[in-house]
Image: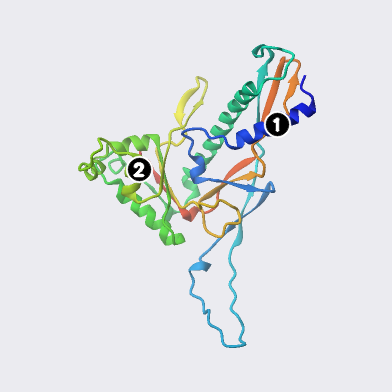
Amino acid sequence: MLNPAQGRVVDPILSEYVRGYKQPQLIGTALFPRAPVAQYGGKVIEFGKEAFRLYNVKRAPGGATGRVEFGYEGKPYAIVPGALEAKVPREWMRDASQVPGINLASRAVNLVMRAMALSHEYECAQIAHGAGNYDSDHKVALASGSRWGDAVDPITDINKGKEAIRSSIGMEPNVLEISASTWNKLKTNPKLLERIKYTTVDSLTIQMLANLVEIQNVVVGKAVVASGADDSFGDIWGNDAVLAYVSDNPSPNNEEPSYGYSYVIEGHPAVELPYWDANAKSWIYGVSDDVTPVLSGMTAGYLIQNAGAD
Protein backbone atom coordinates (compact mmCIF):
# COMPACT_ATOMS: atom_id res chain seq x y z
CA MET A 1 0.00 0.00 0.00
CA LEU A 2 1.08 3.59 -0.62
CA ASN A 3 2.36 5.25 2.52
CA PRO A 4 2.44 9.08 2.95
CA ALA A 5 6.15 9.28 2.21
CA GLN A 6 5.70 7.48 -1.09
CA GLY A 7 2.65 9.59 -1.89
CA ARG A 8 4.60 12.80 -1.54
CA VAL A 9 6.98 11.57 -4.20
CA VAL A 10 4.19 10.94 -6.71
CA ASP A 11 2.12 14.00 -5.88
CA PRO A 12 4.58 16.78 -6.91
CA ILE A 13 5.35 14.99 -10.16
CA LEU A 14 1.71 14.77 -11.16
CA SER A 15 0.99 18.30 -9.96
CA GLU A 16 3.66 19.67 -12.27
CA TYR A 17 2.24 17.48 -15.01
CA VAL A 18 -1.28 18.89 -14.73
CA ARG A 19 -0.09 22.49 -14.55
CA GLY A 20 1.24 22.07 -18.07
CA TYR A 21 -1.89 20.30 -19.22
CA LYS A 22 -3.65 21.66 -22.31
CA GLN A 23 -6.70 20.19 -23.98
CA PRO A 24 -7.03 20.72 -27.74
CA GLN A 25 -9.89 22.90 -29.00
CA LEU A 26 -10.57 24.57 -25.63
CA ILE A 27 -10.24 28.32 -26.07
CA GLY A 28 -11.70 29.82 -22.87
CA THR A 29 -8.31 31.00 -21.63
CA ALA A 30 -7.93 33.13 -24.77
CA LEU A 31 -10.61 35.40 -23.25
CA PHE A 32 -10.02 34.56 -19.60
CA PRO A 33 -6.28 33.84 -19.09
CA ARG A 34 -5.29 32.31 -15.76
CA ALA A 35 -4.10 34.89 -13.23
CA PRO A 36 -2.70 33.44 -9.97
CA VAL A 37 -3.96 34.98 -6.72
CA ALA A 38 -3.25 34.20 -3.06
CA GLN A 39 -6.76 34.67 -1.65
CA TYR A 40 -10.14 33.14 -2.40
CA GLY A 41 -11.89 36.50 -2.49
CA GLY A 42 -11.15 40.11 -3.24
CA LYS A 43 -11.97 43.02 -5.49
CA VAL A 44 -11.30 43.30 -9.20
CA ILE A 45 -9.03 46.29 -9.72
CA GLU A 46 -10.59 48.34 -12.51
CA PHE A 47 -9.14 51.28 -14.40
CA GLY A 48 -10.94 54.31 -15.75
CA LYS A 49 -9.87 57.06 -18.13
CA GLU A 50 -7.16 58.51 -15.91
CA ALA A 51 -4.37 57.60 -18.34
CA PHE A 52 -6.19 59.38 -21.20
CA ARG A 53 -6.60 62.75 -19.49
CA LEU A 54 -4.35 65.71 -20.16
CA TYR A 55 -2.57 66.79 -17.01
CA ASN A 56 -0.48 69.84 -16.30
CA VAL A 57 2.85 68.11 -15.85
CA LYS A 58 4.89 71.32 -15.63
CA ARG A 59 5.91 72.80 -12.30
CA ALA A 60 7.64 75.96 -11.24
CA PRO A 61 10.97 75.63 -9.37
CA GLY A 62 10.10 74.76 -5.78
CA GLY A 63 6.42 74.40 -6.67
CA ALA A 64 4.12 71.56 -5.78
CA THR A 65 4.06 68.45 -7.95
CA GLY A 66 0.77 67.36 -9.46
CA ARG A 67 -0.63 64.04 -8.42
CA VAL A 68 -2.62 61.38 -10.24
CA GLU A 69 -4.77 58.67 -8.75
CA PHE A 70 -5.51 55.57 -10.76
CA GLY A 71 -7.37 52.33 -10.34
CA TYR A 72 -10.19 51.55 -7.98
CA GLU A 73 -11.77 48.54 -6.36
CA GLY A 74 -14.51 47.28 -8.60
CA LYS A 75 -16.74 44.25 -8.40
CA PRO A 76 -15.87 41.57 -5.85
CA TYR A 77 -14.77 38.16 -7.00
CA ALA A 78 -14.92 34.88 -5.15
CA ILE A 79 -13.08 31.75 -6.21
CA VAL A 80 -15.27 28.68 -5.86
CA PRO A 81 -13.15 25.62 -4.99
CA GLY A 82 -13.22 22.89 -7.63
CA ALA A 83 -12.20 19.27 -7.21
CA LEU A 84 -12.80 15.91 -8.88
CA GLU A 85 -11.53 12.38 -8.37
CA ALA A 86 -10.82 9.39 -10.59
CA LYS A 87 -10.26 5.82 -9.47
CA VAL A 88 -7.78 3.24 -10.67
CA PRO A 89 -9.32 -0.20 -9.98
CA ARG A 90 -7.06 -2.85 -8.52
CA GLU A 91 -7.87 -5.07 -11.49
CA TRP A 92 -6.08 -2.65 -13.83
CA MET A 93 -2.73 -3.29 -12.16
CA ARG A 94 -0.40 -6.14 -12.95
CA ASP A 95 0.41 -6.57 -9.27
CA ALA A 96 -2.55 -5.73 -7.05
CA SER A 97 -0.31 -5.12 -4.07
CA GLN A 98 1.52 -2.25 -5.73
CA VAL A 99 0.65 1.41 -6.10
CA PRO A 100 -0.40 2.34 -9.66
CA GLY A 101 2.54 3.20 -11.88
CA ILE A 102 3.04 6.69 -13.23
CA ASN A 103 1.29 5.71 -16.48
CA LEU A 104 -1.94 4.61 -14.80
CA ALA A 105 -1.77 7.55 -12.41
CA SER A 106 -1.32 10.07 -15.24
CA ARG A 107 -4.20 8.50 -17.17
CA ALA A 108 -6.47 8.89 -14.14
CA VAL A 109 -5.37 12.50 -13.68
CA ASN A 110 -5.84 13.13 -17.40
CA LEU A 111 -9.46 12.02 -17.16
CA VAL A 112 -10.08 14.37 -14.25
CA MET A 113 -8.35 17.28 -15.96
CA ARG A 114 -10.39 16.82 -19.14
CA ALA A 115 -13.60 17.02 -17.15
CA MET A 116 -12.45 20.04 -15.13
CA ALA A 117 -11.14 21.86 -18.21
CA LEU A 118 -14.46 21.33 -19.98
CA SER A 119 -16.32 22.69 -16.96
CA HIS A 120 -14.13 25.80 -16.99
CA GLU A 121 -14.68 26.20 -20.73
CA TYR A 122 -18.44 26.12 -20.17
CA GLU A 123 -18.18 28.78 -17.45
CA CYS A 124 -16.15 31.03 -19.74
CA ALA A 125 -18.67 30.67 -22.57
CA GLN A 126 -21.61 31.44 -20.30
CA ILE A 127 -19.97 34.70 -19.23
CA ALA A 128 -18.68 35.72 -22.65
CA HIS A 129 -21.99 35.04 -24.44
CA GLY A 130 -24.24 36.39 -21.68
CA ALA A 131 -25.89 39.43 -23.30
CA GLY A 132 -26.77 40.81 -19.87
CA ASN A 133 -23.06 41.24 -19.13
CA TYR A 134 -22.71 43.97 -21.79
CA ASP A 135 -24.14 47.46 -22.13
CA SER A 136 -25.99 48.55 -25.27
CA ASP A 137 -22.82 50.06 -26.81
CA HIS A 138 -20.91 46.79 -26.62
CA LYS A 139 -23.25 44.27 -28.18
CA VAL A 140 -25.38 43.72 -31.26
CA ALA A 141 -27.95 41.05 -32.12
CA LEU A 142 -27.90 40.19 -35.81
CA ALA A 143 -31.32 39.58 -37.33
CA SER A 144 -32.17 37.08 -40.06
CA GLY A 145 -30.77 38.30 -43.37
CA SER A 146 -27.87 40.14 -41.71
CA ARG A 147 -26.06 37.14 -40.24
CA TRP A 148 -22.69 35.89 -41.42
CA GLY A 149 -24.14 33.05 -43.44
CA ASP A 150 -26.06 35.61 -45.52
CA ALA A 151 -24.77 37.82 -48.33
CA VAL A 152 -23.33 40.39 -45.91
CA ASP A 153 -19.79 41.47 -45.13
CA PRO A 154 -18.88 40.23 -41.62
CA ILE A 155 -15.92 42.59 -41.53
CA THR A 156 -18.36 45.50 -41.28
CA ASP A 157 -19.78 44.08 -38.02
CA ILE A 158 -16.30 43.29 -36.73
CA ASN A 159 -15.06 46.81 -37.47
CA LYS A 160 -17.99 48.27 -35.53
CA GLY A 161 -17.03 46.13 -32.57
CA LYS A 162 -13.38 47.09 -32.87
CA GLU A 163 -14.29 50.77 -32.86
CA ALA A 164 -16.60 50.36 -29.85
CA ILE A 165 -13.72 48.85 -27.87
CA ARG A 166 -11.12 51.35 -29.09
CA SER A 167 -13.33 54.31 -28.21
CA SER A 168 -13.87 52.87 -24.72
CA ILE A 169 -10.38 51.80 -23.65
CA GLY A 170 -8.07 53.34 -26.25
CA MET A 171 -6.92 49.97 -27.60
CA GLU A 172 -8.27 47.73 -30.32
CA PRO A 173 -9.21 44.13 -29.58
CA ASN A 174 -6.52 41.48 -29.93
CA VAL A 175 -8.83 38.46 -29.70
CA LEU A 176 -11.74 37.37 -31.87
CA GLU A 177 -13.63 34.35 -30.54
CA ILE A 178 -15.99 32.61 -32.94
CA SER A 179 -18.02 29.47 -32.43
CA ALA A 180 -17.73 26.42 -34.64
CA SER A 181 -21.05 27.18 -36.33
CA THR A 182 -19.99 30.78 -36.92
CA TRP A 183 -16.70 29.62 -38.46
CA ASN A 184 -18.60 27.31 -40.81
CA LYS A 185 -20.70 30.27 -41.97
CA LEU A 186 -17.63 32.44 -42.50
CA LYS A 187 -15.92 29.81 -44.66
CA THR A 188 -18.79 30.02 -47.18
CA ASN A 189 -19.57 33.72 -46.82
CA PRO A 190 -19.69 35.20 -50.36
CA LYS A 191 -18.18 38.55 -49.36
CA LEU A 192 -15.16 36.92 -47.73
CA LEU A 193 -14.68 34.49 -50.59
CA GLU A 194 -14.66 37.47 -52.94
CA ARG A 195 -11.84 39.02 -50.90
CA ILE A 196 -9.63 35.94 -51.20
CA LYS A 197 -10.48 34.82 -54.75
CA TYR A 198 -7.12 35.95 -56.12
CA THR A 199 -5.09 34.02 -53.55
CA THR A 200 -3.63 30.58 -54.13
CA VAL A 201 -5.62 28.83 -51.40
CA ASP A 202 -8.87 26.99 -51.98
CA SER A 203 -10.68 28.06 -48.82
CA LEU A 204 -10.61 30.63 -46.03
CA THR A 205 -8.19 29.83 -43.19
CA ILE A 206 -8.03 31.15 -39.64
CA GLN A 207 -4.82 33.02 -40.40
CA MET A 208 -6.39 34.62 -43.47
CA LEU A 209 -9.36 35.74 -41.40
CA ALA A 210 -6.99 37.19 -38.79
CA ASN A 211 -5.21 39.13 -41.53
CA LEU A 212 -8.46 40.37 -43.04
CA VAL A 213 -9.84 41.69 -39.75
CA GLU A 214 -6.41 42.77 -38.43
CA ILE A 215 -6.79 40.93 -35.14
CA GLN A 216 -3.84 39.08 -33.70
CA ASN A 217 -5.58 36.04 -32.21
CA VAL A 218 -8.62 34.41 -33.83
CA VAL A 219 -9.86 31.34 -31.95
CA VAL A 220 -12.66 28.91 -32.79
CA GLY A 221 -14.64 27.33 -29.95
CA LYS A 222 -15.25 23.75 -31.04
CA ALA A 223 -15.91 22.12 -27.67
CA VAL A 224 -19.14 20.21 -27.17
CA VAL A 225 -20.84 19.07 -23.99
CA ALA A 226 -23.18 16.13 -23.39
CA SER A 227 -26.34 17.01 -21.48
CA GLY A 228 -29.88 15.81 -20.88
CA ALA A 229 -31.22 12.34 -20.27
CA ASP A 230 -29.83 11.01 -23.54
CA ASP A 231 -26.43 12.76 -23.28
CA SER A 232 -27.00 14.65 -26.52
CA PHE A 233 -24.11 16.82 -27.68
CA GLY A 234 -24.37 20.59 -27.99
CA ASP A 235 -21.87 23.34 -28.79
CA ILE A 236 -20.55 25.13 -25.72
CA TRP A 237 -19.93 28.34 -27.69
CA GLY A 238 -23.31 28.50 -29.45
CA ASN A 239 -23.45 30.72 -32.53
CA ASP A 240 -22.13 34.06 -31.26
CA ALA A 241 -18.82 35.90 -31.66
CA VAL A 242 -16.86 37.99 -29.16
CA LEU A 243 -14.24 40.67 -29.73
CA ALA A 244 -12.00 41.45 -26.77
CA TYR A 245 -8.86 43.17 -25.67
CA VAL A 246 -7.08 40.72 -23.36
CA SER A 247 -3.90 41.62 -21.54
CA ASP A 248 -0.87 39.58 -22.60
CA ASN A 249 0.39 39.84 -19.01
CA PRO A 250 -2.47 38.31 -17.01
CA SER A 251 -2.34 39.57 -13.45
CA PRO A 252 -4.94 41.06 -11.11
CA ASN A 253 -2.45 43.89 -10.52
CA ASN A 254 -1.92 44.64 -14.19
CA GLU A 255 -2.43 48.37 -14.75
CA GLU A 256 -4.45 48.18 -17.94
CA PRO A 257 -8.02 47.29 -18.83
CA SER A 258 -8.52 43.68 -19.80
CA TYR A 259 -11.65 41.81 -20.82
CA GLY A 260 -11.34 38.95 -18.36
CA TYR A 261 -9.25 36.76 -16.10
CA SER A 262 -9.49 33.30 -14.65
CA TYR A 263 -8.47 33.93 -11.07
CA VAL A 264 -6.75 30.79 -9.81
CA ILE A 265 -5.27 30.03 -6.42
CA GLU A 266 -1.48 29.88 -6.57
CA GLY A 267 -0.15 26.37 -7.03
CA HIS A 268 -3.25 25.04 -8.75
CA PRO A 269 -4.13 22.71 -10.30
CA ALA A 270 -2.74 20.30 -7.75
CA VAL A 271 -2.97 16.53 -7.52
CA GLU A 272 -4.12 15.45 -4.08
CA LEU A 273 -2.39 12.69 -2.12
CA PRO A 274 -3.65 9.38 -3.60
CA TYR A 275 -5.50 7.10 -1.21
CA TRP A 276 -6.81 3.54 -1.16
CA ASP A 277 -10.58 3.00 -1.16
CA ALA A 278 -11.06 -0.50 0.27
CA ASN A 279 -14.76 -0.63 -0.63
CA ALA A 280 -14.11 0.18 -4.31
CA LYS A 281 -10.87 -1.82 -4.34
CA SER A 282 -9.31 1.15 -6.11
CA TRP A 283 -6.72 3.85 -5.78
CA ILE A 284 -8.27 7.31 -5.84
CA TYR A 285 -6.59 10.27 -7.52
CA GLY A 286 -8.07 13.68 -6.85
CA VAL A 287 -7.27 17.01 -8.49
CA SER A 288 -8.07 20.43 -7.07
CA ASP A 289 -8.29 23.38 -9.42
CA ASP A 290 -9.68 26.40 -7.60
CA VAL A 291 -10.29 28.75 -10.53
CA THR A 292 -13.12 31.13 -11.45
CA PRO A 293 -13.46 33.16 -14.67
CA VAL A 294 -14.35 36.82 -14.15
CA LEU A 295 -15.40 39.50 -16.62
CA SER A 296 -13.07 42.22 -15.38
CA GLY A 297 -13.61 44.79 -18.14
CA MET A 298 -16.87 44.70 -20.06
CA THR A 299 -15.95 47.75 -22.13
CA ALA A 300 -12.94 45.79 -23.42
CA GLY A 301 -15.35 43.38 -25.12
CA TYR A 302 -18.03 43.36 -27.79
CA LEU A 303 -20.64 40.63 -28.29
CA ILE A 304 -22.06 39.80 -31.72
CA GLN A 305 -25.10 37.60 -31.17
CA ASN A 306 -26.47 35.14 -33.72
CA ALA A 307 -23.49 35.60 -36.06
CA GLY A 308 -23.48 31.90 -36.95
CA ALA A 309 -27.23 31.28 -36.71
CA ASP A 310 -29.24 30.10 -39.72
The label number, if any, that marks residue 291 in the structure image: none
Q: CA distance from mark 1 to mark 2?
A: 40 Å
- Give how far across and how far down residue 241 sits, in percent: 40, 43
- Give how far across and how far down residue 240 sits, in percent: 40, 41
**The disc labelled 2 sits on which kind of residue?**
Gln
- Residue most extreme to the left: 198
In the displayed structure image, the side of residue 233 where residue 5 appears, left or right: right
Is tag 1's residue or tag 2's residue first in the polypeptide sequence?
Answer: 1
Residue occupying image coordinates x 70% and y 31%: 11
- Give how far across and how far down residue 193 sits, in percent: 24, 41
Indicate the quadrant containing the N terminus: top left, top right, bottom left or bottom right: top right
Question: Residue at label 1?
Answer: 11
Visible in this render: residue 288? no
Residue occupying image coordinates x 49% and y 51%: 246
Q: Secondary structure at mark 2?
A: helix
**The disc labelled 1 sits on which kind of residue?**
Asp
Question: Residue at label 2?
Answer: 207
Query: From what the image shows, is residue 284 above or below residue 148?
Result: above
Cβ atoms at labels 1 and 2 below 8 Å apart: no
Disc 2 crowd rating (10 Å Cα; few below 14, some 14-19, many 20+) is few
Which of 190/8 is in front? 8
